Amino acid sequence: MELELLLLLAREGAIGQKKPFTMRALGERMGTAPQTVMRKLDNLELKGYVTRTVRGRKTYIEITPQGIRFLRDLHEELCRVLHGDYMVGEVVSGLGEGAYYINEYRERIKEYLNFDPYPGTLNVKLIHPRTVFDAVADLEPIIIPGFVRGGRTFGDVRAYRVRVNGIEGAVVIPSRTIHPPEIAEIVAPLNVRESLNLKDGDRVRIEVVR
């Protein structure tokens, strides 16, 4: 709760200036009693994270340089933890079109990804990060070039190598897709769902291969 209070103070602009607050208002924002807020504020002050001055009914609070460093270090640590080379999500059923497109792109997948794809995809709705694009933002994609067949144009596909519980595969992002960005579509040389005995709702971790 001390961290929650410190973050609330930062959001309210108590950095580089003293901002006026009442314990009642802070308590309402945090869903707790004013007395609890006072105790947490005492602890933050003892740690050197805030300074405060009481004027009448209001308490003027400012986050100290030490408090700012604490928040900055916490932010950097969270970034390291949350922006690792992985995705986490839950298995969902696809739209039933994966097999068709995999068959159309099969020879190109074999050429550019070096495996013969199973005719279907594993679809994972991401919990972290928010979208597939967030997970691969700093990676160079493998471009599987598009083509025209039977008067129909098939666009380029961006692919990124991944592992799902040790199974090698790739996340594919077609240039034109009806999947929302939080769905990771994975191709692999075997049926990942059956191989790992996965069903809808099962959670999986997808390791991004650099």
Image: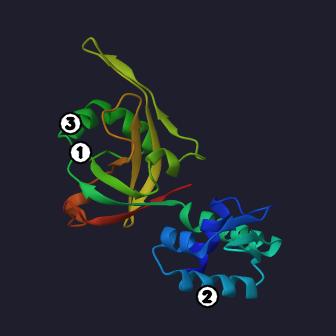
Q: Which residue is mark 2?
A: 39
The kind of secondary structure element at disc 1 is loop
Could you tell whether 58 is left or right of 34 in the image? right
5 w.r.t. 112: above or below = below
User: Which labelled disc corresponds to residue 41?
Assistant: none
Please say if 77 is above or below 118.
below
Q: Position of residue 158 (x, y in %)?
A: 46, 37
Mark 2 crowd level (few <14, some 14–19, many ≥20, 10 Å Cα):
few
Q: Nearer the viewer, residue 83 or 6?
A: 6
Label 3 element class? loop
Give the camera-side residue of 199 and 55.
55
Residue 99: x, y in percent? 21, 39
Task: Give the number of the disc on residue 120.
Answer: 1
Q: Is residue 4 left or right of residue 113?
A: right
Amino acid type for the residue under numbered disc 3? Glu
Counting from the top left corner in percent of width and height, residue 106 is at 31, 36
Q: Quadrant of residue 190?
A: bottom left
Write the residue at 58% across / 46% down: 139
Q: In the rendered picture of this protein, how many numbered marks are placed on residues? A: 3
- Residue depicted at x 39% and y 24%: 155
Q: State the separation of the CA atoms marked 3 and 1.
A: 8 Å
In the picture shown, does residue 91 fall above or below 29? Answer: above
User: Mark 1: few, some, or many residues within 10 Å (few <14, many ≥20)?
Assistant: many
Instruction: Give the camera-side residue of 41 and 24.
Output: 24
- Residue where numbered disc 3 is placed: 97
Task: Name the amino acid type tagged 1.
Answer: Gly
